[in-house]
Image: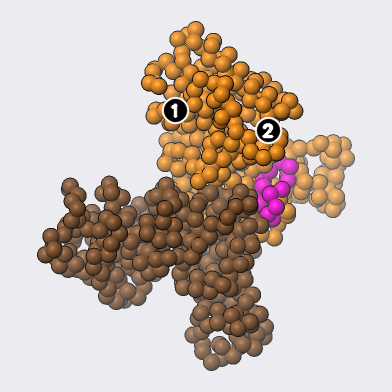
Chain colours: A orange, B brown
Amino acid sequence: MKISMNDFVASVDLGGTNLRVAAVDDGGTILDERRIPTQVERGRDDVIERMCDLILDLSSDLRKKKRRLAGVGVGVPGLVYYHRELHESPNFPGKGYFPVKAKMEKILPVEVIVDNDANVAALGEVWKGAARGFRNASLLTLGTGVGCGIVLEGKIWSGTRGTAAETGHMIVDPNGELCNCGSYGCAETYASAPWVVRRARAAADRGESAFLKKLFRENDKATAADIFRLARTGDPASRGIYQLVGWALGIVIANLTNVLDLEKYIIGGGVAKAWGAFAPFMMREVFARSYVYRAEKMPIVRSRLIDRAGLLGAAHMVWQRLGR
Amino acid sequence: MKISMNDFVASVDLGGTNLRVAAVDDGGTILDERRIPTQVERGRDDVIERMCDLILDLSSDLRKKKRRLAGVGVGVPGLVYYHRELHESPNFPGKGYFPVKAKMEKILPVEVIVDNDANVAALGEVWKGAARGFRNASLLTLGTGVGCGIVLEGKIWSGTRGTAAETGHMIVDPNGELCNCGSYGCAETYASAPWVVRRARAAADRGESAFLKKLFRENDKATAADIFRLARTGDPASRGIYQLVGWALGIVIANLTNVLDLEKYIIGGGVAKAWGAFAPFMMREVFARSYVYRAEKMPIVRSRLIDRAGLLGAAHMVWQRLGR
């Protein structure tokens, strides 16, 4: 298919709560955007159908403006094998592999490229965000887990099977806590929101902080943001937990530096809002532990696109495939 | 310069003891090979001069057979910035940056490409060795230090500045021993020859092994190979040290798996001869800790080219640059 000036690509950000679709031109302008609740409980096939309906709706509206759909890019949480199949994603409940690409291409008239949500978000940050103008960068998203995307020479590095950049499971301390993945001391057991809460709850239970004790007594659903608030007001136990977040991220970024020698490391996700509480410890650890960056400018920045990173990155991934 | 069938490239393996030069054709055949002692004590410029003399000698001999030098590839230990400058290599003593490429190109009539010795060795293993037929692989060389080369999509990944694949300084245990690099618990503090000896000596001093005690009493210069021999005969302390080597390598390879999702991980270098003593522990650790490889075939193999990996890899690096 020959690509014309009036083409657009549809990009999808399939989150746990919202399913978002955007129409993006090759300059990175979002022409239109739609969102509906994901409603995973209705099953995988239903999500696929509603996602495609949304894309077709958007396309039909834009066709009236003489704009044509040229491709579809999808960012989805979980392991995506060979840009095709999703393996046991929390946002697509169900056992085994699920052929997202094939299912969507049965409904849609164009090629569909699927990748991990953090991978496409990293590409978004390189295209239009915090790493704009750089070719080698990594994004760490601190949320329910620790997501990661790696961009090398301007393109997503998905690995041989598509499962690269699972940096949330990089081992920070081999004697650390048991992670969901079966290993111990993964980055995720320090820098994800549930683990911040879990460590705060443990500190409260151990009687290390009257503030944390009060917090959990009054609100059993207290969040990482609540604990950040306590850290800011000076509660030593809460500060210690974010210090640990920074320490763990510092070790991860030192390792990425030594292994990949990138230009920018970007921190995003909900927990990144606590930047002030963890960043100094992160910087200190990177400085002390990265063999080669030692004397240079610290290349760690905050995410700039926030919730548009995934939509823009998924679109850029498709534009790259189309040769733009 | 147009490349013809009769062209060859000269590749250099600049080791601490020997300086080796080979003439390699684009099929990977070594047409000729020379070696002289490196003699680093004579200074950096002297090494450069003798290296270039050797290449010019080789070229002049091959010219009689109608073969023409098309380029030069150099593998050298240490940090190589931007394929040009060497930073404080043990084999090139002297302070600060040393412009290997520029110095050599002043003497030689062709382009010179410089990269880290482990990087080019990894490319050699992908071209003609243990990872032949694969596009994404990493080589770990266990010697005086732990060297590493990473090949992505068939090419050396040198990073933004050329300093990638310093995986010897990946952190295995943040609370481990102080490494030369200033960090703690780097891979090198477990899996390099000097650290195997150091841990064995400490075990002997602590009275943990009569065998080790005897070894060091009789031979103050006992090597990692001597300790491997004791491990094979069943000395528990010596076995424990190689178990630790395996454990550390397992954590490193699990991290590389989670971050890069490669097809092959190759283990080379002198310490790799103790394969039987560390490999089972390495495999067990990788299996337990790598999020995505869990159920698949263990992709770890031993180096096949041994001391030709660097020469072949450096040659292939040049052939790639020349478009072959």
User: Which label is found at residue B292?
Assistant: none
Question: Where does label 1 land, which residue?
Answer: A319
- Which residue is at the front of the view, B103 or A65? A65
Label 1 crowd bin: few (<14), some (14–19), many (20+), radius 10 Å = many
Mark positioned earlier in the residue sequence (1 or 2) = 2
Residue A184 image-quadrant placement: bottom right
- Establish whether labels 1 and 2 are both on one chain: yes
Residue ranking furthest to the top: A64
Residue B13 image-quadrant placement: bottom left
Q: Is residue B192 left or right of residue A216?
A: left
Residues under labels 1 and 2: Cα distance? 26 Å
| Residue B4 in picture, x, y percent from top left | 18, 51
Question: Where does label 2 land, which residue?
Answer: A92
**Mark 2 is on which residue type?**
Phe
Label 2 crowd bin: few (<14), some (14–19), many (20+), radius 10 Å = many
- Which residue is at the front of the view, B12 or B132? B132
- Please determine whether, in this image, residue B229 is positioned above or below residue B323: below
| Residue A110 in picture, x, y percent from top left | 49, 22
**Mark 1 is on which residue type?**
Trp
- Which residue is at the front of the view, B154 or A217? B154
Q: Which stretch did the figure color magenta?
A: A180-196
Q: Chain of mark 1?
A: A
